Image: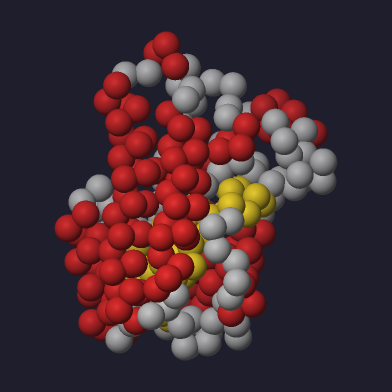
């Protein structure tokens, strides 16, 4: 029960890695607010988690993450309902591999808006609360492409390089208030997005991983549990790569 009595807010938590993070936080004693892009997806995520254990303290919200006002309002609601916010996980994001010469500027802006701007809004809103509390943990989701880029399209890796810079800089700025800021950078994960790819595309990816397997969402979730817990009380400003040693 590494997160007993902690209150966590997780964006992009209706499926995939976000849902896995929510599940492991709940198993470790946290009260968790899961954010989905729509009311139905958020409430369905709550229902699925409750099926595992009726005692789980899990609730759903569905703010527009592109709106700083809605993000701030959601954080304020969590504090009003539960008295505090210990952990903020900015996990929501979108992947994009359109070749650079074919990218519409509006598509590039969409990726940056969700992958960078909304992460900043979440960090800022949480930091305001955590500063007053004198403590808190912020975890952002980066990607392995933030280390090496990717062979097609620049919007996604550019956004994740930005998340890394945001994370490291905020750790230096907010540490004085007892706030730790870190990021996880997943590699090739066994998520719905990857499962939808043809087998002929998946196998070369797996073979490029030294551990010869894709990561599971729970692999990322357990790192987040560590970062959110007191076990990581002196860990801040780090980008933790969860990629099986993959370098390309």
In front here: 19 or 179?
179
Is residue 88 at all visible to an observer of this figure?
Answer: yes
Q: Is residue 12 above or below residue 84?
A: above
Image quarter where the C terminus lies is top right
Q: Is residue 21 above or below residue 27?
A: above
Judging depth in this view, the residue of 40 and 194 nearest the camera is: 194
Q: Position of residue 129 (x, y in %)?
A: 30, 74
Q: Is residue 228 above or below residue 151?
A: below
Is 165 situated left or right of 122 in this image?
right
- Residue 57, image x, y percentages: 42, 83
Could you say which quadrant of the image residue 150 lies in?
top right
Judge by depth and name the residue closer to the eye, 117 or 244: 117
Q: Position of residue 107 (x, y in %)?
A: 32, 27
Q: How is the image coloured?
A: secondary structure
On screen, residue 222 versus residue 211, left or right, reads left
Relative horizontal placement of residue 97, taking residue 212 as reference (left or right):
left
Q: Please report the residue visible at 34 percent of the width from the left and 52 percent of the height from the top.
A: 120
Image point (61%, 58%), residue name: 220
């Amino acid at each position: 029960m590494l997160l007993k009595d902690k209150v966590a807010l997780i964006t992009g938590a209706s499926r995939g890695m976000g849902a896995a993070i929510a599940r492991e936080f709940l198993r470790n004693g946290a009260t968790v607010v899961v954010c989905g892009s729509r009311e139905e997806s958020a409430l369905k995520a709550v229902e699925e988690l409750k099926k595992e254990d009726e005692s789980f303290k899990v609730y759903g919200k569905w703010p527009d993450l592109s709106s700083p006002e809605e993000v701030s309002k959601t954080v304020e609601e969590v504090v009003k309902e539960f008295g505090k916010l210990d952990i903020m996980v900015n996990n929501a994001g979108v992947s994009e591999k359109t070749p650079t010469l074919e990218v519409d500027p509006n598509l590039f802006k969409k990726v940056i808006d969700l992958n960078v701007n909304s992460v900043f809004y979440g960090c800022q809103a949480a930091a305001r609360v955590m500063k007053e509390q004198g403590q808190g943990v912020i975890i952002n989701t980066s990607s392995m492409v933030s280390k090496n880029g990717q062979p097609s399209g620049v919007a996604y890796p550019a956004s994740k390089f930005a998340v890394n810079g945001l994370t490291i800089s905020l750790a230096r700025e907010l540490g004085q208030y007892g706030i730790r800021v870190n990021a996880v950078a997943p590699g090739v994960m066994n998520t719905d997005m990857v499962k939808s790819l043809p087998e002929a595309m998946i196998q070369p990816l797996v073979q490029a991983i030294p551990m010869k397997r894709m990561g599971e969402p729970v692999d990322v979730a357990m790192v987040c549990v560590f970062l959110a817990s007191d076990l990581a009380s002196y860990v801040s400003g780090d980008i933790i790569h969860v990629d099986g040693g993959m370098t390309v």
